[in-house]
Every structure is written in structure tokens, then in C-alpha cells.
């Protein structure tokens, strides 16, 4: 992709205010008689979450072809993620064309779209484990930490950067833990108590939607009681894929709201970070859920992941940006895809990220425009997509620095090989040539 390919957005000006509000789940043969009241119930959503291919076959009947089901079964042999999808998302998939649907692509693996991993991929691409002083905590930036209190989510995303630990084991990846590892939480609080520079805690995982109300309160109150901690953020993809929880799990919303009020009483911020990647995830249910959170005074920010065939088109990205802004969700980041296993088909070139950023900027207010970033492999942290030191586009090698986080060190990010020219692909296939290209790029960057 180059600047000629990324044209101006053709999205009509008010398109972002149209939210789907029909009984779309009734198009799934197995749910044709499910009422709106049942569909709204968060317990119904959890109980009917889709986890097995046999369940998919039963729910859809003849709606999908045998070939698609076989493709799905073959995808399960290599994916690092379990299948888990809420009925909300499952019913929003375009079952007339599942192979090309951006929602199917995010949650259901198919063998026909798998591409071999990049030779420089890493299971822990962001080196979170290297920067972990106590279990379940990453401390990289001086004033900010990442707390991972659990390893489960209401959906499992095929693009997950923590696929090495999230969800249950699969045919290709053995995982050690499952669920909320509460036994380590107090060690985390003690470490933070003794780390006076830390002001900001991201509570991620896993997904905060899978913490129960008591756990939301326990974590929030313990963190806020640490005098030097000023900001906490609960991270969840839940608002995007399970808005019914916000609408009907009153105990959970109350726990979040109470932590928020407790934070305000201390002059501290409690916010939610969520994870919309496709306009197709957004409906009237999302708007109702956001109206409730907004009325509680809770600020929500969005972090999307740039994915090939999901949102790497200017129209999709502009619509997503305007929609979340309209719903009082601040578009915060769009990430270049991390170099983790099982995701090569999702990755885009750095050039695509740079050009999309240019195309999206100016389509709405600046504070409602996301920053496109590359989270540097090897632990350099997030850098603006255009802030690389050197970019060999022909061979797909970019070189970066992170002067404050890791002074004097250089980092490399690589474009997906299948998007390079045949000549460049041949160079990557030869190991000595590949190594020489990387050394040369780093040298040209001055390192
Ligand atoms: S919700 Fe987040 S942590 Fe869970 S699978 Fe998706 S990307 Fe990974």
C-alpha cells in the first residue's frame, strides 16, 4: 500500500450515527426464537457462548458450507487461541460470507488463511516477561505498570498479543495457568507500595469483564489506597463484544462505579480502556451500554489493532474513529500488529500504518483521532508509526529507538514477508542474506 492507494474516505458524513437495532441474532437458526429480553441477559450471553465447532454446526445448520466447517477444523490445529465468542458477536458475523467477514477473521481461525510465522516472530514479542519484577506485573516505564490479574476473556481474539498465556492450551501451545491467579495479587500490591515512582496501573490480562464484582472492588481499592498511585485503568474488550454485561450485570457495574467514586474522593482517575477494532462490532447495544457508563461518569478510551482485511482500509478506520467518538469513547491508539505466532495473515506493512494515519487525521477533531503506534518488539514501548530511524521498505525492515525507555538500544520491526516483492521474499528465504540485511539496516540507522 502507498499514499496513492490510501485515498480519501468515502464514508458519508453522518454514517457513524446509524446503529443497528434489529433482532439480528434471530438470523442464527439455533437462536431464531430467543427474545430480546433473553439476549439482553448477561448470564444468557455467557451460558450460550460458542466454544466448539460442533456447537457452531448445530447453531447454523445448513447456513454454512461443509467446506467452511472443514476449514475451521483445520485452523484449530495451528492457532494458539481457544474458540470463545459471545452470542452477540457470533450473530454479527456475516454468515453469508464468513471467510471475508472482519468479525469471523478476528475470532474463528481457518486453515486456508494461515501463513507461516515471520522468522523474527516471538511468543513474547513485547518482552513483557523480561520486565516482570513479580509474577503478573510488567514494569517497563518508570511511572507505569501493567498488572495482569487473570488469563481469561469473554472472547478469544486470534490476534492476541498474549496468546502465550491467555485462555486454555491448544494443539500448538501449552499454557500453565487459567483464570484469576489471586494468590499473587497481594505480592503485586506490596511491590507497588515499595515503588514510589509508579503513578499509573493498567489492569489487563485477560479481561476485566471476567473479574467478578468483588475482585473489581478488591483490586481497585487496594491500588487506590497506595498513596503515590494516581491513575488506574481497567482494560476490557467487553464493551465491544459483550455490551449486555454493562446493561444487566448491575453488581459488576456498581463495583466499577464505586471504585470510580472512591478514586474521585481521593483525587485519582479510574477509567476503562476498551478494544473496538471493527465498525461491525458496534450496534445500538453498544450505544446503550456506553450511555450507562457515561452517566456513571466513567471515561472510556479505545485501543484498536490494525489488521489486514479487518480495518486496514481508510473507510473502515474513519468510520470506526467517528463511531467511537460519537459514543463518548476516546479513540486512543491504533497498534501495528505485534509479531506474535499465528498472526502473520493479520499483519500489515509499516507503510500501511503510516498512510492510514495520514488519511484518518483531519476527518474529525484532533482529540478524537487515534495515535497510530508500533509497540516495539523487544520491549522498547510504543512509538509513533512515523518516528522510525530508518525504513528499508524494499525488504520490510524498520529500525527504531526508545531513548528514555531503553537508552542506547535499537529495535527492529519487520513487515510481513508475503507483502514484499518476490525478490525480497527470496532474500528473506536465505538466512545469511537475511541477517546481512538486518545488520545493514541497523547500521544505516546509525547503530
Ligand atoms: S480480549 Fe484482549 S487479552 Fe483477551 S484474547 Fe482478546 S486481545 Fe487477548
Image: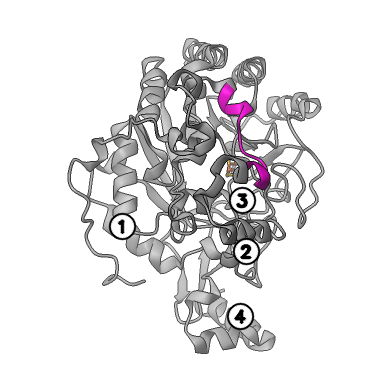
What residue is disc 1 on?
Answer: 314
Spatial CA distance of label 4 from label 1 is 34 Å
* Label 1: how many Cα within 10 Å (few below 14, some 14–19, many 20+): many
The numbered mark, 1 or 3, whose residue comes first in the sequence reads: 3
Q: In the visual, does 107 lie left or right of 240? A: right
The numbered mark, 3 or 2, whose residue comes first in the sequence reads: 2
Q: In the drawing, what numbered circle is on residue 111?
A: 2
Ligand 1 lies in quarter: top right
* Label 2: how many Cα within 10 Å (few below 14, some 14–19, many 20+): some
* Label 4: how many Cα within 10 Å (few below 14, some 14–19, many 20+): few
For the residue with label 3, is its CB less than 8 Å from the closest atom of ligand 1? yes
Residue at image coords 45%, 58%: 100
Which quadrant of the figure contains the C terminus?
Answer: bottom right
* Label 3: how many Cα within 10 Å (few below 14, some 14–19, many 20+): some
Q: Nearer the viewer, mark 2 or mark 1?
A: 2
Spatial CA distance of label 1 from label 3 is 24 Å
Q: Are marks 4 and 2 in contact (CB under 8 Å)?
A: no
Amino acid at each position: 500500500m502507498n499514499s496513492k492507494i490510501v485515498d480519501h474516505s468515502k464514508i458519508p458524513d453522518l454514517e457513524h450515527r446509524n446503529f443497528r437495532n434489529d433482532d439480528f441474532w434471530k438470523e442464527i437458526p439455533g437462536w431464531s426464537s430467543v427474545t430480546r429480553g433473553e439476549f439482553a441477559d448477561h448470564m444468557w450471553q455467557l451460558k450460550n457462548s460458542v466454544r466448539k465447532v460442533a456447537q457452531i454446526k448445530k447453531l447454523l445448520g445448513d447456513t454454512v458450507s461443509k467446506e467452511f466447517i472443514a476449514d475451521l477444523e483445520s485452523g484449530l490445529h495451528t492457532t494458539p487461541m481457544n474458540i470463545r465468542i459471545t452470542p452477540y458477536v457470533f450473530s454479527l458475523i456475516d454468515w453469508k460470507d464468513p471467510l471475508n467477514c472482519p468479525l469471523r477473521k478476528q475470532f474463528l481461525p481457518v486453515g486456508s488463511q494461515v501463513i507461516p510465522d515471520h522468522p523474527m516472530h516471538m511468543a513474547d514479542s513485547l518482552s513483557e516477561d523480561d520486565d516482570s519484577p513479580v509474577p503478573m506485573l510488567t514494569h517497563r516505564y518508570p511511572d507505569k505498570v501493567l498488572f495482569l490479574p487473570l488469563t481469561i476473556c469473554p472472547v478469544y481474539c486470534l490476534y492476541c498479543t498474549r496468546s502465550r498465556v491467555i485462555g486454555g492450551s491448544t494443539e500448538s501451545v501449552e499454557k500453565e495457568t487459567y483464570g484469576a491467579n489471586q494468590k499473587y495479587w497481594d505480592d503485586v500490591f506490596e511491590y507497588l507500595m515499595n515503588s514510589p515512582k509508579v503513578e499509573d496501573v493498567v489492569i489487563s490480562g485477560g479481561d476485566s469483564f471476567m473479574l467478578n464484582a468483588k475482585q473489581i472492588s478488591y483490586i481497585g481499592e487496594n491500588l487506590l489506597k497506595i498513596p503515590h498511585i494516581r491513575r488506574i485503568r481497567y482494560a476490557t474488550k467487553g464493551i465491544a463484544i459483550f455490551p449486555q454485561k454493562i446493561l444487566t450485570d448491575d453488581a459488576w457495574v456498581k463495583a466499577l462505579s464505586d471504585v470510580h467514586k472512591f478514586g474521585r474522593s481521593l483525587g485519582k482517575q479510574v477509567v476503562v480502556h476498551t478494544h473496538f477494532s471493527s465498525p461491525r462490532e458496534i450496534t445500538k447495544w453498544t450505544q446503550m451500554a456506553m450511555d450507562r457508563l457515561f452517566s456513571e461518569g466513567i471515561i472510556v478510551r479505545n485501543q484498536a489493532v490494525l489488521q489486514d482485511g479487518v480495518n486496514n482500509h481508510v473507510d473502515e478506520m474513519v468510520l470506526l474513529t467517528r463511531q467511537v467518538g460519537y459514543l463518548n469513547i476516546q479513540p486512543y491508539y491504533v497498534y501495528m500488529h505485534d509479531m506474535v505466532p499465528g498472526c502473520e495473515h493479520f499483519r500489515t506493512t509499516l507503510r500501511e500504518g503510516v498512510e492510514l494515519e495520514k488519511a484518518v487525521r483531519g476527518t474529525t477533531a484532533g482529540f478524537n483521532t487515534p495515535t497510530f503506534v508500533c509497540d516495539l518488539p523487544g520491549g522498547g514501548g510504543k512509538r509513533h508509526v512515523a518516528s522510525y530511524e530508518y525504513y528499508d521498505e524494499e525488504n520490510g525492515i524498520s529500525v527504531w529507538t526508545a531513548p528514555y525507555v531503553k537508552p542506547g538500544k535499537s529495535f527492529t520491526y519487520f513487515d510481513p514477508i508475503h507483502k514484499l516483492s518476490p525478490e525480497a521474499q527470496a532474500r528473506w528465504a536465505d538466512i545469511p542474506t537475511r541477517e546481512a540485511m538486518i545488520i545493514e539496516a541497523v547500521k544505516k540507522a546509525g547503530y
